Image (tube, grey):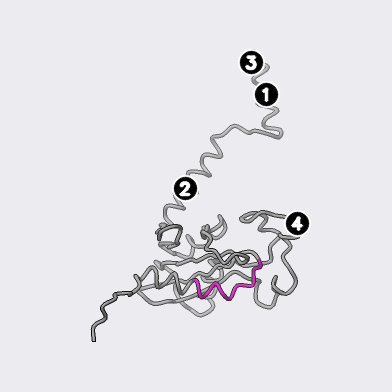
Amino acid sequence: MKSSNNTRLSKDEYYLQIAHATSRRSTCLRRRFGAIVVKNDVIVSSGYNGSARGVVNCDSVGCLKDKLNIPQYEGYDHCIGVHAEENAVINAARSGNCTLNGVMYIFGENVKTSEETEPRPCSRCRRVLINAGIAEIVIKKQKIVHIKTKDWATEDTKSYIGMFERKPTNGPEKERNEEEACCAL
C-alpha cells in the first residue's frame, strides 16, 4: 500500500535526529551535545559531552562554570567535560573504526530550556576533527549547514600567519616599538 503522505526524512535530518538522541546521554548541566560519525552511509561512532570515563559527572556534583559565572563557550579549563566531537573520534579509535573522510553530524540543546542551540566546535575540537580526517560537519541552525573541515584549516593558517604580521599591542615588544617610534623623531 502506497502512503499518501511522504514523511521520509532526508539523510541529513535522519542523522541529526540520531545525534539528538545521542545528546540525551550528556551529563552536562548547561548544554547537551551529541555527535555521530558517518562513513558510506554507516554510523561508525557516536559521542556526547560529559566527563571522562571513571570521572565524576557534573550532574552528580554541579557545574563549576556555573558556580564561577563563566559564560557559555568560554572557560574550558574549568570544565571537566570531554566534548561530543572529541568523544565521537575517541570512541571510533577505541572500537577500531576509521574516521578518515567521514561526516560528523552534531546536535546541540540547552538543558534548561530544551531549545536547540547551535553547535559551534571550539578551536580544540576543530583541530581534532581536522586531524581525524573528518571531511565535513553537518549542523542545524535555522537550516541544515554543511561545513568543510578543510575550510577550517585554511582559516587557522591565515589567522596564525596574520598573528606574525600584526604589531604587538602589549608587553615588552610594544614598549620597544613605542621607544623606536619616539627615537625616530
Residue 3 appearing in the image: yes
Callout 1: SS: helix
Residue type at mark 2: give it. Glu
Query: Mark 4 sits on what residue?
Result: 68
Closer mark to the observer between disc 1 and disc 2:
2
Callout 2: SS: helix
Asked whether 149 or 119 is in front, the reply is: 119
Residue at the (42%, 68%) spot, across then down: 100
Which mark sits nearer the N-terminus, 3 or 4?
Answer: 4
Q: Is residue 180 above or below residue 154?
A: above
Query: Mark 1 sits on what residue?
Result: 178
Residue type at mark 1: give it. Glu
- Give the quadrant of residue 103: bottom left
Q: Position of residue 15 (x, y in %)?
A: 42, 72
Which mark sits nearer the N-terminus, 1 or 3?
Answer: 1
Callout 3: SS: loop
Q: Is residue 49 above or below residue 70?
A: below
Query: Mark 3 sits on what residue?
Result: 184
| Badge 1 vs badge 4, beta-carbon distance below 8 Å | no
Crowd band around label 3 with a 10 angstrom C-alpha radius: few (<14), some (14–19), many (20+): few
Asked whether 84 or 168 is in front, the reply is: 84
Label 1, label 3: how many angstroms apart (C-alpha)? Answer: 10 Å
> Magenta includes 153?
no
Query: Mark 2 sits on what residue?
Result: 155
Mark carried by residue 59: none
Q: Main secondary structure of the magenta part?
A: loop
Label 2, label 4: how many angstroms apart (C-alpha)? Answer: 32 Å
Callout 4: SS: loop
> Magenta includes 22?
yes
